[in-house]
Amino acid sequence: MIETIFAFFLGLLAGIVTGILPGVSILAAMAILYPVLLYFDTINAIILYVTLGACVNYFASVSGTFFGVVASPTAIPSMIEGHALFKKGDGDAAIMHAAIGSFVASMFALLLTVGLLEFLFVFYNLFNSRIKLIIFFIAIVFFILTADNKWWISLIFAGVGLFLGNIGFREGTMEEFMTFGITPLYSGLPLISVLLGLFVIPHIFLNLESSQKTVSFNPITFSGYIKNLKEMLSYKWIIFRSSLLGYITGFVPGMTYILGVSISYGLIKRKKQKENTYEKGDLHCLISTECANSAGALSVILPLLLIGIPITGSQTMIYSIAMNNGIDMTIQYFQSMYFNVIIAYTITSIICVFIAGKYVNWISIIKRINFDYIYIIIILILILIVFLIGSRTLQEWYYLSILAIFLPFGYALRKFDVTPAIYSFILADHIYYSLRSTIALF
């Protein structure tokens, strides 16, 4: 029991720090904690992982809204809409709606998992490589149609992203692409360097060029949460649809819930664009992406827990701990411990909704500071983070070099929406293997 409590609070603390620090991923946090996890039994390691993941969503959303930076690609739409609202002086509304939407979506995903537990294994088997490829194609089309560019420009960006995402060496097929015999390129282009160089830092430069230097911000209060909770009833269909999309795409191995996030965001944004009512800082778009993100963050761990398939780098650490402890990850094992996971996840969601509000009120003192100074500090921190992440594999200079190469291109394209390139880059491997498997069937 003491170990379980310790695992819970360690996951909570790690999740807060990971969410606050821009560019720090769950994988990085798990790598740091891994020596400690080796002393945990499997259930407590899973509780720490679930707690950490749930907590990251809330605090990453706050950092994205305040500072205009993202910790993961799934948070890009939230950052775009949330930070725009913040600059308009509606940061409190953005954070409370996002937090409440995340909480509702988390509870929805939790109840759906409990209700469908007996059928999830069958549901998983429905998704073969052909269906995945169709969904990937739909997602790419969404990226192109919903980006703030002419469609042909977004199409070019998507093509560039797929090209860049295929650079490297594939052990499964023993194929290499555009490596030129350069050893670091065999592992592919590092996501953190591409993401920061092509999108995040140029976006910060765009904010630096803005004439707006200070931002007004209303403190977050408990009564504000109650008021916004009542208002959320008017978004009930957006919450339901986005949560369901995020949940489904998170559950399917090889798909990742970034698809659910982008499709949910794209549906609302496209509708508003057709009605000529869309502008950056749209609450409907913000809520849709937060709900899909939170629901997917839970369902993405189900393939590991139900059928023993780790689909992210951080999950492989949990899987290795289970193997070391002689645990076979099956639906029967999950049924024996899912009550503990549900309790940990629920308590984490409740705590994070309110702690995130307190954190916001604390950092709101920056509203008196010229934001140019804050943006410059953030850029320096992001460069340091790239160095530190690269140093974990003794590739710090490679990571910084890739960042330096992409930064001029990102700056030149800063007034374009390059998200199709980012999303296509992330999905390139998934699309390649789905396409290869589909061709092999014929």
Image (spheres, rainbow, N blue to C red):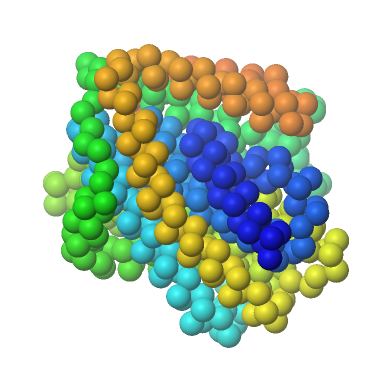
306 displayed left or right of 22:
right
Foreground pick, 12 / 126: 12
Q: Is residue 103 above or below residue 331?
A: above
Foreground pick, 142 / 291: 291
429 displayed left or right of 246:
right
Residue 59 appears in which quarter of the rendering?
Answer: top left
Foreground pick, 4 / 203: 4
User: Which residue is outermost to the left?
Assistant: 276
User: Which residue is outermost to the bottom?
Assistant: 118
- Numbered-mark total: 0
What residue do we see at 59% from left, 68% from top? 341
Q: Is residue 10 above or below residue 330?
A: above
- The spot of residue 373 in percent (x, y) is 38, 14
The answer to whether residue 346 is visible is yes
Which quarter of the image is occupied by the C terminus?
bottom right
- The spot of residue 346 in percent (x, y) is 48, 65
Residue 77 appears in which quarter of the rendering?
Answer: top left
What residue do we see at 79% from left, 45% from top? 35
Q: Is residue 293 above or below residue 84?
A: below
What residue do we see at 43% from left, 63% from top? 106
- The spot of residue 332 in percent (x, y) is 70, 81
What residue do we see at 39% from left, 19% from top? 374
- The spot of residue 277 in percent (x, y) is 14, 47
431 displayed left or right of 294:
right
Residue 369 appears in which quarter of the rendering?
Answer: top left
The answer to whether residue 252 is visible is no
Which quarter of the image is occupied by the N terminus?
bottom right
185 displayed left or right of 269:
right
